[in-house]
Image (cartoon, rainbow, N blue to C red):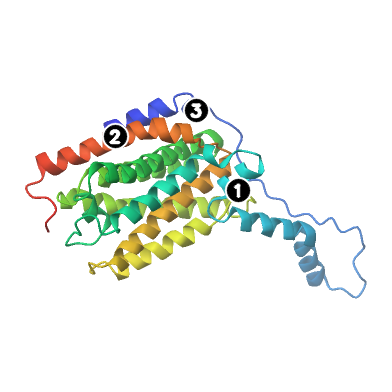
Amino acid sequence: FFILICMLLLHYPLLITENMAGYFSFSRVSDDPRPPDSTTTTQDADKRTLMLSASPGREMLASHVARRTLNVCFGECTALTVAGEPIWSQGTILVLIEYFLFVLLSLSGGFMIPKNISICGYLELLPNWVAFLYFHVAAAGIDSTLWHSVMSVKTETYVPLATAQMLLGVGCAGTLFGFSVFPRCLWQLHQGCVLWWVYVTSASMALKFFRDYAKVNYTAAPVFLWLLGVVMCNLLYFESSFRFYTAESLTIIAYIAWCSSLHHFHGRKFSTFRVFLVNGLEAGVMLSLYRYNQHKVCKTSGSW
């Protein structure tokens, strides 16, 4: 956690002290210039006023739905492409490519299959050049989550919500860091971090949903993808099968999508250069800690 705090301070030293205007303003005013019909009851008039105030019209509604559809999971990438940013400069694209490459290499048959078929099971057996892909993705996720914590403090003026989002974000990053550097052979530490990562991330997603679901640049698609992955992991938990591996991979993809949606929500440009250099260095540190724990702290490794 000391390393995690250092990462936070190195990444965002100036943003932590800033404070900007917040939200929580609601209005419900009808813009219908027509007088109410003489035969219309007060209740019907209220319903019509509410409908008119809640919907900006069919055209705006269609635009809203289209934008939400484009946002889906990776609205950040869509927005940057529309703005003219080349695909190769988008860090999230690199993260996705690396993760899919990690999965393909792990399951290619060129490496030993663990007795427990899971991502953490494979990591203890894979060579460093393949394992690095996973740790690079994890480092990018920690970066994005810490950045969201800072932005929560920066943009949210309602102190309890800002505090909750910040603490949950740091908790997500801390537990992700924990189960990434503690191998499966340190079972209590590893599994404890995994479970708390699921709990804290679910709470953070839920808070974000109830806070911002009505905003046009928010999308709940990663949340539902996350819920699907978590449910599948619970149902298949006692299986040592590729179905469980698939469920785990789904939660990681959902987490990447959630991080991407946060970038889009706040207008962040998560550059390939940052992912390659900054997160690459962090991934190297995490991989070194993982191997140290695996070979120096664990009594046995790769066998359960």
- Relative image position of residue 281 (x, y in whole percent): 34, 31
Q: Position of residue 278 (x, y in %)?
A: 39, 30
**Residue at point 36% right, 39% down?**
139
Q: Residue furthest front?
A: 110
Residue 287 against residue 302 in the figure, above or below: above
Would you say 143 lies left or right of 289 here? Answer: right
The answer to whether one can see residue 1 in this image is no
Say which element carries label 2. helix
Q: Nearer the viewer, mark 3 or mark 2?
A: 2
Please say if the residues under marks 2 and 1 sit with CB atoms less than 8 Å apart: no
Q: Which residue is mark 3?
A: 15
Give the SS element for disc 1: helix
> Label 1: how many residues lie within 10 Å, few (<14), some (14-19) or many (20+)?
some
**Does residue 44 appear in this view?**
yes
Q: Looking at the figure, which quarter contains the N terminus? A: top left
Using the image as rendered, state which of residue 3 and residue 253 is in the foreground: 253
Quadrant hosting residue 80: top right
Q: In the rendered structure, which amino acid carries the disc numbered 2?
A: Gly
Look at mark 2 in the image and give the residue it sits on: 284
**Would you place residue 30 above or below residue 267 in this image?**
below
- Residue pointed to by mark 1: 78
- Image quadrant in which the C terminus is located: bottom left
Q: CA distance from mark 2 to mark 1?
A: 30 Å
